[in-house]
Amino acid sequence: MITHAVGDHTVARTDFDRDRLLGLIKQNLAKELSAYHLYNILSIYLDELELFGVREIIDAACARDRRHYQSMLKRFYQLSGTFPARIEEFDIKLKDPAAMFSAVHLNIKEAFEKTVEIKQSTVLGYTRICNITLGRDRKTYLLALSILNEELELKTWFSQFMDARYPEIDFSNPLL
């Protein structure tokens, strides 16, 4: 069982809205989960095209987002956040529709565009977390800052990928 004592004690000594922080973390957890799911779909498609160099980058991004999700989820619980144990109960109302998507009708171009949107959204979310925890909750701040830097790298890579020309990829081809 994850202890709440350390996170609660740290936050209790400061003057910021813990519920707001937990809400921001919860939103970013949903975005990380969405990105992870999308990477898996892209990975399968890129395997079929035998684009292993691009696939390796997608796999690295997938592993990073899984680590982001796991480390931020642990911090969320340390701050006494409650999170559903079942995915069906993962009911998060986001102002940002980029975090959730339906992959059924996406083509490869739309999937990469959606990835860039999710990365932009997570960058904004982690920036907000950093802004409200700076000087108040060092552990959450350092974790969010570390993740923010990795998210910026991923966003840059996906943006550059979209600007590059890959004649071997039929971007209009449906994923599923």
Image (cartoon, helix red, strand yellow):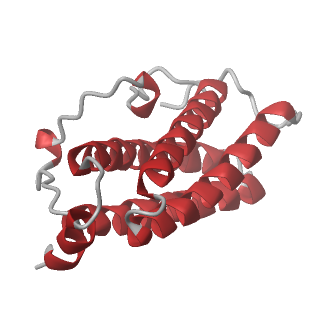
Q: Position of residue 64 (x, y in %)?
A: 53, 63
Residue visible at 15% across and 53% down in the picture: 83
Residue visible at 60% across and 52% down in the picture: 151
Of the pair 28 and 16, the residue shown nearer to us: 16
Residue visible at 18% across and 68% down in the picture: 8
Q: Position of residue 5 (x, y in %)?
A: 14, 77
Residue visible at 40% across and 27% down in the picture: 101
Q: Position of residue 96 (x, y in %)?
A: 42, 25
Q: Is residue 129 above or below residue 175?
A: below
| Image quarter of the N terminus | bottom left
Of the pair 46 and 77, the residue shown nearer to us: 77
Q: Is residue 162 above or below residue 68?
A: above
Q: Position of residue 159 (x, y in %)?
A: 75, 37
Left or right: 99 as drawn, with respect to 155: left
Which picture quadrant has residue 163? top right
Of the pair 59 and 48, the residue shown nearer to us: 59
Which picture quadrant has residue 24? top left
Count of numbered circles in the view: 0
Residue 3 visible in the displayed image: no
Q: Is residue 12 above or below residue 44?
A: below
Of the pair 112 and 106, the residue shown nearer to us: 112
Left or right: 100 as drawn, with respect to 149: left
Residue 116 visible in the displayed image: yes
